[in-house]
Structure formats: C-alpha cells, structure tokens
Image: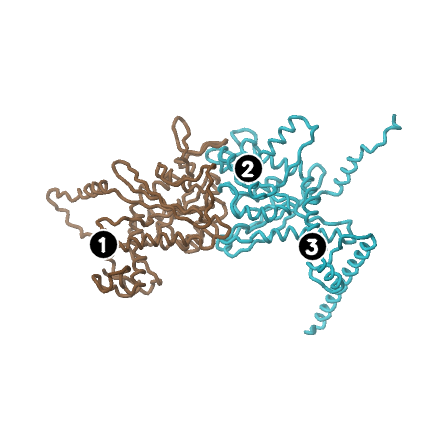
Amino acid sequence: MSKGFPETRTDAAMSELVPEPRPKPAVPMKPVSINSNLLGYIGIDTIIEQMRKKTMKTGFDFNIMVVGQSGLGKSTLVNTLFKSQVSRKASSWNREEKIPKTVEIKAIGHVIEEGGVKMKLTVIDTPGFGDQINNENCWEPIEKYINEQYEKFLKEEVNIARKKRIPDTRVHCCLYFISPTGHSLRPLDLEFMKHLSKVVNIIPVIAKADTMTLEEKSEFKQRVRKELEVNGIEFYPQKEFDEDLEDKTENDKIRQESMPFAVVGSDKEYQVNGKRVLGRKTPWGIIEVENLNHCEFALLRDFVIRTHLQDLKEVTHNIHYETYRAKRLNDNGGLPPGEGLLGTVLPPVPATPCPTAE
Amino acid sequence: QDKEYVGFAALPNQLHRKSVKKGFDFTLMVAGESGLGKSTLINSLFLTNLYEDRQVPEASARLTQTLTIERRGVEIEEGGIKVKLTLVDTPGFGDSVDCSDCWLPVVHFIEEQFEQYLRDESGLNRKNIQDSRVHCCLYFISPFGRGLRPLDVAFLRAVHEKVNIIPVIGKADALMPKETQALKQKIRDQLKEEEINIYQFPECDSDEDEDFKRQDAEMKESIPFAVVGSCEVVRNGGTRPVRGRCYSWGTVEVENPHHCDFLNLRRMLVQTHLQDLKEVTHDLLYEGYRARCLQSLARPGARDRASRSKLSRQSATEIPLPMLPLAETEKLIREKDEELRRMQEMLEKMQAQMQQSQAQGEQSDAL
C-alpha cells in the first residue's frame, strides 16, 4: 500500500479533535490536469490491466466476522453470500450443539475462486454471544480478538526483515445480526456496537427478515437507524470517511435508506416459475432469497462483495489499523512494540495525539 | 312414572345458571422476551385491543430497566356469559444485558397472589373472595433460537410448580414446516431433560367418539403451540376475508390449521380448558403452596414467635396464619384472634388518619 502525502491539519481542525482522533485516509495528491494536447497514445491506462493480472496471480484475503445470538441464521447467510459451505454450520437439529458458556472465536478459512480470481476467505464465527442469562461484557473476547489481529500485523510491520506480503488476518468486516423483534434494538445490540464500531467496520443486518411485512420492516429500520444515530454509533460506511462527493451521495443513499439490510438466507433450492432459486418454502408461499421484492439479500451481497469489498479492506487498514497502531506507539512511549528494537532503527514518533507526516 | 323421577338431573342446569349469573374470573399471565408477538396474540385470542396505549421503550431506556408486572383487565361477554379477564404482563423480561434473577419478581408476584388467597380463605368474610391467582402462564419461546435458551429454562424452572405453563412458539411464520417440527421436538426433549412440568391437558373421557379422541390427541401432540397472531383482516385471493399477515410471497392465515396452531391454542385454552386450568391452580398448585407455607410455620420456633407477636403491628409477611387445626375450638380461638388483630390494625390506622387530618387542620408540624 503506498502512502501519499497526508493532509495537513489547520489549527481550526485541531481544536475540534476528540481525544482519540482518527486520521483521514491518506489521499494521493490530485494530479495536475494536463493540457490534453497529447500527441499519440502513451499507454498508461494499461496499468489497470497490469494490476488486475497481478491481483489474479496473488489472490487476496478477506476476513469477515459474524456476530449475533444463536439461531439468527449467521452461518446460513454467509454460506449464501459466498455460495459455498464456508461457515461452521450448526443448524442440524440432531447435533448436540451446546451453547458455549463464554463467547468463542472460531475462524475457518477457505479458498474460493471465480473468473480466475482467487480469494482466501476467512469466516470468523462467535458462538455464545448474547446467549447467556448474563451477557455483561460478552463483547470483550471479540474486541480482544480483533485487536490481536492488529497486533499481529503490527509486529510483522515493524520487523526489520519483513515478509513480502504480510498475511492479513485483520477483520475487514463485521456483520452484526439484529433480531427482528419489530420494536427496536436490544440493549445488548447497543452495547456491542458502541464498543466495537470504533475498532472494526460494522455492518448491521436484520436477520430472518421474513417475519416482517413491508410496513413493519420499514418502520423497524427507521427506528433502528434513529437509535444508532442518537447513540452516536457509526456503522460502515462511516460518514467521516467518504472521500468525495460521489462516494458521499452513493453512501448517503445506502446509509439512509437501505441499511440495515433486512436479509433472509437459505441453502435450499426450489422451483419457481421454471427457475431454480434459493429460498424458503412455507405453506403460504416461497420466499426467494435473491428477489428484491422479498428481502434485501441481493443488496447486501452487492454491497459487501461487488462494490465495497476493497473499500472495506482499505478502511480497515487506513483507519482502524492506523488508530490501533498510533495508540500502541503512543503507549510505548513512541517506540514500536516488541523486543529487541529498543533504540534501534526507527526514530521515536513524537508523543502528540495527532500523527503528522511520516 | 313421575313418582320415580327425583329430578336432580337438573343440577347441572342450576350450576350453569348460577355461574352465568356470577360471571367468570380468569387471570392469564403472558411471559417471554419482547418482540415475540405476545400482545398481538392476546389481542387475536380475545378479539380485543388491550395494548393500544402501550409504548415500547427504546433500547437505551431499557439498559437500566428492571422487570415490572403490569395488569390489564377486560370484561368480555359472549353468549350471555361474562368473563372478567385479567392479563398479567411482564415487560422488561429478558431484555437487559444481564438478566440474572430477572424472573424473581414474577415468582414473587405469583406467590403474593397465593398468599393473599390464603389469608382471605382463613379470614372471616369468605363470601366475596377475589381470586387474583394466576391461572395460566403462556410462555413465549423464540422461533429464532434452537430450542429453549438458558433464560427460558431458568424462568420455567422457577415457576413450573406455581403456575400452569402453556409453552408457545411466537411468530411461528418465521419457520418452515420441517423447522417447526424439529423445534417443537427439541423443546419437548429439553422440557423433559430439565424436568419442567408444563400444564397437562387432561385425558378425554373414554366414552367420547373416535373423531374427538383423534382430534384431542393431535392437539396434544402440537404442544408447544406454534402461533401467529394478527388483528388485521386481509383478503386472500378474493375469498372471504380472514385474519392474517400479508407478505410479498403470500399471506399467512391465523386461523388456518395448516399455517399455525392458533386455532388449537384457542380451542384448548379458551373453549375447553379454562375451567380445568382454574381447578388445577386451586387443587394442585395452590394447595401445594399452602401446604409448604403451613408446614414451615408448624416448626417450633415459628409457633412461639407467632403467639408472642399477635397483637403488635406486624409487616405483611409475619402475620400469623392459622395453624393446622388440632381441634375445632382451637380453630375458633385462632379465628377470633385474627379478627381481633385486624380490628386492632384498623383502629390504629384510623387513629393515624385522624391525627394526620388534625395536624393538617392545625397546620402545625406536630407528630
């Protein structure tokens, strides 16, 4: 990842800073527009093709975490998203799945391929979340796991002899499953999102949305959005990281109208109008997962995979990870963490709350 | 031939007429976490709009909310029979991040009603005892879980010996038929494993016809009832209007037995077993409470304490209840003592009131 010239902060901006400011994403300097009197074709636009070829060769990582009470269809949804059995699925009634007493973190990796592009997908499940009678602080193991991945990456980064490609286990996206009560968020939902929206990209989804009629869905979503706003919870895509007007208009529409996505997942196919579709068959009709009149699964899939996948990774790296890194360096008196680095290569970062030019 | 006819075959009619005149009391408790369709189901069951003025607080308000017990009364009349229905709600149940012991207020409430009845029954004026005991508890299980959750188990274990429990699966239109069956089986297994006693619908008489017996068996097998509630009337494909929920992929009909068990629940709860629920509450659950209560009082220490503190003012929990009667005279003595104590209490209350109004009249700070 190349870092361009960071934006310099004016004094006015400094006075508005909150204790732990998050650095704006590094934006490459806008190119000076050249008088388009170019003679002939240079061929710089082939860089896109070159990048594409390289990406296809190396493949890329994507780590997605799912959080929510048991039975909300987390595993099924992830399997539906990636059209493969990528998640630990405990929906079989015969299996003796005891609810774990504490929240466990289970990461399962798969390599999936499409159109010559390889993706190393890791699904991180969190069984036990919200299932106990007392769920105080049940988000702590999750926060700990996320920070541990940042720590792992940081340690690799500060190594003298660095790996060519640092393995990226950081959580790029956290799907939070809201129970479709029809009333509002639960206290636990608020607590989780308050704590974790500052360390990871949270995408809230309304699970098992086939229990709500259109009006109920729309009212519920409005109420949830309002509650999140009132409580200062910023879910992905966060307003402060919209890079330009185009981003802002696109994301505004998603934030204010579509999210949270009301989804239904399924791994069973049924015949509808001569086509085989993924769905749920009930005595009163068949719910088609990919039918936008039935639920918003297709919107979620397009959002996470087809349009914002790369952005999810970038925000994770440029914002969340950088916040973690800055805090760690500050805590360490400006020195990078880890042993054997005292007083060596890197100059100490000044202990100010705002990281300036590197 | 008239001479051989005594005439007590008319007894049931007399009873019937008396109960019609007297009316019928029933207290139904509805419990379960919020968002499972409890209020909608109650409105559907009794064709009322009991929860019109209800406001569900937002999540941030519920962060520090404790469980409250709410009572709503409604008088329903049908076919000349008046039913005074009291609904007991438990808003806040299962809501907090930490739900430890959140069922204790409910247990306490149920026992309070028993205690009240016990006192009334042992008192002197027994003609108009108000029966506020909880006759039935509809416990709502989430269709989104994988059976009973730890909180469900804890609640059921705390109340199953004190109230008739009828478990239902709320918002059952979230489930496909196979999922419903699997969930019901899982819940039944868990209830057995955790030794939770739910209300047992009694066996039907052996002289009922086969059809009725089969229907009865089917209904019993569908417990826990998977229900869907709705107060909206929809038109399903141009046929007659029915109560249901309209989705883009079809309409769920509340009263369609292929869609959900609403009819079964209504039939078993309201149409056939209302009286039995009251009887089981009185003959089994209340008697159990009473026996436990009196046994604990019959311990030596308790007896002395009770006799010593008879005439002094006492808190509600320490009122000496009549002991297991050893002889009729002793029983009478105790009843008289009770009356004396109550009159004493009333006197003291009146005195306090007089003093209070006096103080207010004089506008002084005395007392």
**B255 sits left or right of A126 in the view:** right
Of all residues, the one furthest to the front in this rendering is B300
Circles 1 and 3 on the same subunit: no
Of all residues, the one furthest to the left in this rendering is A39
Residue type (three-letter) at the residue carrying disc 2: Ala
Q: Is residue A4 above or below residue B239?
A: below
Q: Looking at the image, which residue is at 71% across and 53% down?
A: B294
Q: Are marks 2 and 1 in contact (CB under 8 Å)?
A: no
Q: Position of residue A183 (x, y in %)?
A: 50, 47
Q: What chain does badge 1 belong to?
A: A
Which residue position holds label 3?
Answer: B296
- Chain B pictured colour: cyan
Q: What chain does badge 2 belong to?
A: B
Which residue position holds label 1?
Answer: A3
Q: Is residue A347 above or below residue B92?
A: below
Q: Position of residue B140 (x, y in %)?
A: 56, 43
User: Is disc 2 placed on a helix, strand or loop?
Assistant: strand
